[in-house]
Amino acid sequence: MSGKVTPVNRGEFEREVLQADQPVLVDFWAPWCGPCRMVAPVVEALAEELDGKLKVVKVNTDDNPELAMKFGIMSIPTLMVFKGGREVERFIGFQPKPALQRRIEPHLD
Amino acid sequence: MVEVQVQSAARSVAPQDRLWDVVILGGGPAGMAAGLYTGRALLSTLIIEKAVPGGQIANTYLVEDYPGFLSIEGPELARKMEEQARHFGAEIVYGDIESVDLKGGVKTVLTSEGTYRGRTVIVATGASPRKLGVPGEDELAGRGVSYCAICDGAFFKGEKLAVIGGGDSALDEGYFLARYASKVTIIHRRDEFRAVRQLVERARQHPKVEFLMNRVVERIEGDGKVERLILRDTRTGERSAFPVGGVFVYIGMIPNTGFLKGQLKLDDRGYVPAPEDCATGIPGVFVAGDVRYKFLRQLTTAVADGSVAAMMAEKYLLDQGVEPGTKEKEAAVKA
């Protein structure tokens, strides 16, 4: 499982993200989004480095517009961190890895 | 064979610990073209990019004015340019440029991720969308305030949208957004558009596009997302609330030159003045693309600048006695 970014759909979101035991990083992306392709390797690297402390999933907003709407996603890439079913961080647009890491780490146990 | 071994040895040295022949600031079309030329000339080449290789074309839906491609998606052309620059040996690192020291024979570039050193620097940092500078704009960015229709348009299906601006981009992107929106209102502060007539007519004839002239945005309001604009009529001074689900701002660009203050001469709009040879006046420092003062800012003029700047950098290095092809032997410099 190490370094894996699991795709999650609308039906799985509740269980995989909101009810997860660990903090979860969610990458909202779409295939046509250029900057999303840039973010993907950064997200994969974080999944690997923070394996065991952070769960990392991705949501394709084309296939899951309900989720995008529910969380008010109006620009991608958007990365969100959920802890205990609650949004604790939101990053809109491309962010370099160190910047992401600095803001994610305080939420890890 | 020996050279191959030397190369692989140098490649294991971290980019921060090398002295690069050419450091290119910005991985847009100008930077990629420069990197392709200097890489091909066997100069060790580092490109520093802050976000996504490709610059503005990475956020452009279709490119139809670049010779050789009848029509190509912006991100795809960006990817091809990156691939080509890398193919000829340019390396790419990511980071926000914070400051530079361009004087002397070794120039340094300080980024959020590390410090890099080069014998020459090509400034190709491009330009970014200009903001309205009104209350609510920053707070609601990514929550209904957008500067990129192709990036964000799909999230506004069935919504009422406003596009601010009167140039080619505003008219073009307004037309593009009409495929998603229930209605697109192009709001402009003057009584006529600056955009070419063909774009104005195309938008005018679209049943979902309407124009609202002589209005400026004073505020963007909404609770967690954009709900309305407060507009002022420039003729009467009258204020009105204009309900929208999103607002796309296309009021021109500003050059990314903040980090150059005190290093390079800038014109009153922040662009770097340089003649046809892209030379900045500081030996070994060149400027290419949208960031340079020029008459026309297009993909074609950016790559033209990139090529010129690259050739000038090579010439400068030759004059300094740095021979192309010796790059890897000299690359690993003790920090």
Image (cartoon, coloured by chain):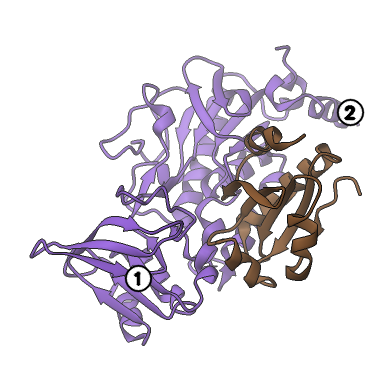
Chain colours: A brown, B purple
Kind of element beneath mark 1: helix
Disc on the earlier residue, 1 or 2: 2
Q: Would residue B20 be found to the left or right of residue B70 on screen?
A: right
Query: Can you say which quadrant of the picture contains the C terminus of chain B?
Result: top right
Q: Which residue is mark 1?
A: B171
* x then y, percent, for residue B116: 62, 24
Q: Which residue is mark 2?
A: B5
Q: Label 1 is placed on what type of residue?
A: Leu
- Which class describes the residues within 10 Å of circle 1: few (<14), some (14-19), or many (20+)? many
Q: Nearer the viewer, residue A9 or B5?
A: A9
Above or below A98: residue A75:
below
Is residue B83 something one can see in this rendering? no
Q: Label 2 is placed on what type of residue?
A: Gln
- Residue under mark 2: which chain is it in? B
Q: Residue furthest left?
A: B236
Is residue B220 something one can see in this rendering? yes
Q: Residue at x 55, y 20 (%)?
A: B108
* x then y, percent, for residue B84: 68, 51
The answer to whether the residues at label 1 and label 2 have Cβ atoms under 8 Å apart is no
